[in-house]
Image (cartoon, grey):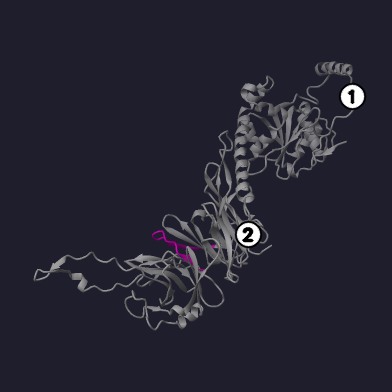
Amino acid sequence: MTESLANMQAVKPKGPKIFIGLLGLAAASGVAWFFLGRAPGPVGEPEDPSKILLVGEDDPAAPMLEQMGFEVEQRTMADAASQGRSAGSSAQSDIDAALHYADSSGYGYVAFANASSVDFGAREVSPESSAVSAHHRYAVFSVGDLATPATTVTVDPNEPLYEVPPHAELVRALFEQEKLAATLVGENNLSIEAQPLFERIRPAVELKGAFGMVEQKAVSAAKRMREYVIDAEEADPKPTLLTEDLERAHGYALANGSVLLLLDAPILQDPATSKVRLEWTSDTRAWTVDLASGERTRCEAADRIRPDSVEVHANGATLLSRWGDDELMVFTVDPKTPGCALKTAGTIAERAGRWGQANASGRVVRAVLDEQEYVAELHTPDEPHPVTWSLSGCTKVSRPIWLSETHIATACEYRPPDPPPPSALVEDPDGEDSVDAAEEDAVEPTPQQWWIYMVDTTDGTTLAYPVPQEFGYNSTLTYRPTGGGLVILAERGSLHSYTFALDTAALFATPPADPQRTKPAFVEGEGIVTALLPTAAKAEELEFEGSPGEVAVTPDGSALVFGADRSGEFDRNLAVFDFATGRTRRIAINEWARHGDPTIGPDGRTVVFNSTYSTPGYGRATVAQTVSLERP
């Protein structure tokens, strides 16, 4: 009876019980046969556990094992089988013929390369044998005396958490064999039999130990990620990871239905020495993941993008990334092309740390202080000079946003200058009194004010809408598409919505100007800025659970996804606010990971976000996840 290696059921010894006397007789006969009657080894030379027959073609592990003290012969399966038949094997199986050749030549083990693609059929193996799985590159068979009473088959026992070089996987599979495993007990604990073998293959023993430490680190890192990201997640249904095993990545939804994955996989440093270590580097590689199929595509065009210096704009149609010390790279995404549809639009100069916001065509708007006046700069990638429009009278402005391909908006705050110090007292000619000369000419200063400035970038026409005191230049504006009137969201601790009766184009064509004040009081000159009626928009505060942090609006404007703080640094959850119902629902909840950077796919239902958690050693790691806005 034989058993398949796929099932790896051990073949148990068979036969009747042998009496003690017969055992002694058999032993004596065996000793006499060993010294007087047998050929060397079961069918040839004595088996040496440091001699390896590697069955495979141009396998890179062979020279590495030789450097570690092993004696390695490499042959193809056909060649090894031919040699076995020449040595007397009558086996029909090439595998059996190759094993016979190794046995007759004194090899202790046969390592079959590409083991997962080899059909080992059904054969008798020892109870200690391992199953050969799809991820195994090598299967090691014991030979001759080392295969008594039955062949032992071993593979690398470790879970494939990271990319292991061929020589390391083969070493780990070899040291699962009994004779080689006996060298791993520590130099002071070696048996007399194991000591010469240890000295011969000491570099391999040391490498095996070093990779054991690497494996511990990998298992610990994988466990931490599962505990902190997967197991600690309270949302039902749970988000779906876009990363595998030990990968760390930031993910961003793109306009073509893919996810840009900036991937940092663990890399082995010094993998050929006992100084081998596992490290995550900043040398990220970009991939795109199809949201429908989950298929990954290498995206070399985005390799220059770094996770700590990228922003996604225009519903995933453009990306900004720092390039060098003083430039920003602009990427555009073709929404009709699947996979890696990124195109480099060009660069713009970074100015005073200000990035700005890009529209779908790749133009970037940002506000800068130019000679004591704020202006809006409109940059076209690779053009040397931006187009500028004055933001008249504003002493502080927020980061501008695009309302359309030709219109922008920014929060404008006016603060009056500090009053001058009191002037010296002037004596009355009669010497009876004194007065402050400045008091006689004092003018009531223009009070502090807050406005939303909207600018037509084709001609500089500016409309100004008055907003309440709690609004300020450090408010974050967000455009909400509705298919109807213009809607601008403003967040500053709380979230306010300003809904105009007209869409952007109609608002500029027939602005509902305020007849009582044609412009903000702090603007000098006429016809530069037109003040709108306070009733031109409906202003309301949106009430929902949590305080909004990073926000993203669905492409149809029906919902707002935002990071919602619950308590501490690693308590930022992800929530969705439904504009129609006014209800808030948490879609990702975790006390041990910070969910943030939400971006929304073009289907309006898939949210891509990043989860950051602590790692052993007090570091930080980030993985990308997705979650659906649809209720299960």
Depicted 492 relative to depicted 145: above or below: below
The reply to whether residue 250 is in sight is no
Residue located beneath label 2 in the image: 627
> Which amino acid is tagged 1?
Lys
* Residue situated furthest left in the rendering: 430
The question of residue 277 being in magenta is answered with no
Asked whether 170 or 454 is in front, the reply is 454
| Mark 2 nearby-residue class (10 Å; few <14, some 14–19, many ≥20) | many
Left/right placement of residue 511 relative to residue 236 reads left
Left/right placement of residue 148 relative to residue 329 reads right
What residue is drawn where x is 17% and y is 65%? 424
Depicted 265 relative to depicted 301: above or below: above
Depicted 477 relative to depicted 50: above or below: below
The reply to whether residue 364 is in sight is yes
Q: Quadrant of residue 351?
A: bottom left
* In this rendering, the label closer to the viewer, 1 or 2: 2
- Expressed as whole percent of the image width and height from the top left, the position of residue 80 reads 76, 36
Q: What stretch is highlighted in magenta?
A: 343-360
- Expressed as whole percent of the image width and height from the top left, the position of residue 89 reads 83, 32
Mark seen at residue 336: none
> Which amino acid is tagged 2?
Val
Q: Looking at the image, how many numbered discs can be counted on the residues?
A: 2
What residue is drawn where x is 11% and y is 70%? 428
**Tag 1 near tag 2, CB within 8 Å:** no
Mark seen at residue 17: 1
The question of residue 349 being in magenta is answered with yes
Q: In which quarter of the image is residue 425?
A: bottom left
* Residue situated furthest front in the rendering: 432
* Residue situated furthest right in the rendering: 16
